[in-house]
Amino acid sequence: MSEKQSKAPQYLGLVGVIVFALYCLFVFIIFDVNDLEDATVFWMSFGFMCVAFLAQLAAPAFMARRAGLDAVFFGIPVIYLSVFYFFAELFASVVFMTFQGVGWKAALLVQAALLAIFVVAAIVSVVAQTEAQNISDERRVEATAFKAQYVDVQTMVDQCVDQSSGDLKSQLEHLSETIRYSDPFGRPDASISEVESRISAKTEALKGFCEASDTEAASGAVADLEKLYMERRRRLLLVK
């Protein structure tokens, strides 16, 4: 997040403070609470407006603590959703203060509905985006692990420098291409996880054979890995 972007929540909070201050000045000048026969609607509307003001301040502060998480609801960031709620409640509270004859039930119903919509939308967006972030992190880990396997095999290719390991080098180069063009992302399937575990174990064994210059054992491990990657590919196709 750039410095310019990071200051946006502060500016929104400042706008909220200014608007709320003007709102308080307006309603307490226009509406004389002491002259009202029943101030229930007034204070109820003012209370909901205070909640909207707190939400306007809390949303940017909350999202600032969740680095890398841009929670959105139908494409609208939660921070801006709080702004929409703030001004919707501002309008509703002024209307009910002006037309207090509608009664406290209507005022309560409308303003409680606005608050509920905002809270539900905020919760859904944060939960959904958190889950998406978790999935993204898991896929990043999977891609890193897959890349590590590719690097390991490439390192083994570079280690095959003598004539006796020429065939093994060709096999390793083919294996590296197999890994390179394989899907780096697994699936939440037990059979695929089992194959991937066998691939990791066999790769470690192959590294040991190469370090010990056991060409025959290494060649057999490469052949086994080729089969395992093919098996993984077939299982991935089945679960897609």
Image (cartoon, rainbow, N blue to C red):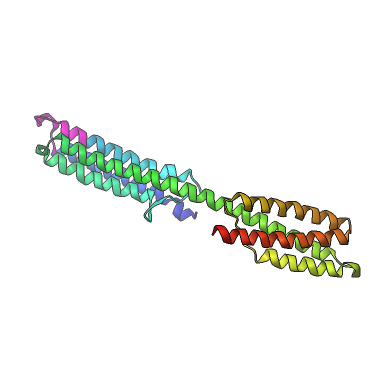
Q: Is residue 216 left or right of residue 51?
A: right
Residue at horizontal 21 percent and vertical 46 percent from the top: 91
User: Whole-percent x and y of residue 193?
Assistant: 64, 51
Total number of numbered discs in the rendering: 0
Give the quadrant of residue 172.
bottom right
- The residue sitting at 81% across, 56% down in the picture is 207
Compared across the picture, whether 221 is left or right of 36 comes to right
Instruction: Using the image as rendered, state which of residue 20 and residue 172 is in the foreground.
Output: 172
Q: Is residue 68 visible?
A: no
* Relative image position of residue 24 (x, y in whole percent): 23, 39
In this rendering, would 26 be left or right of 134?
Answer: left
- Quadrant containing the C terminus is bottom right
Compared to 131, does 33 lie above or below?
A: above
Magenta segment's dominant SS is helix
Q: Which residue shows up at 45% across the image and 51% down it?
A: 70
Q: Is residue 122 visible?
A: yes
Image x and y of residue 93, in percent: 20, 41
In magenta stretch: residue 41: yes
Q: Tell me if residue 6 comes above or below residue 31 in the rendering.
A: below
Q: State the extent of the magenta-drawn residues as a range.
A: 31-45
**Residue 166 is inside the magenta segment:** no
- Residue 16: x %, y % from top left: 31, 45
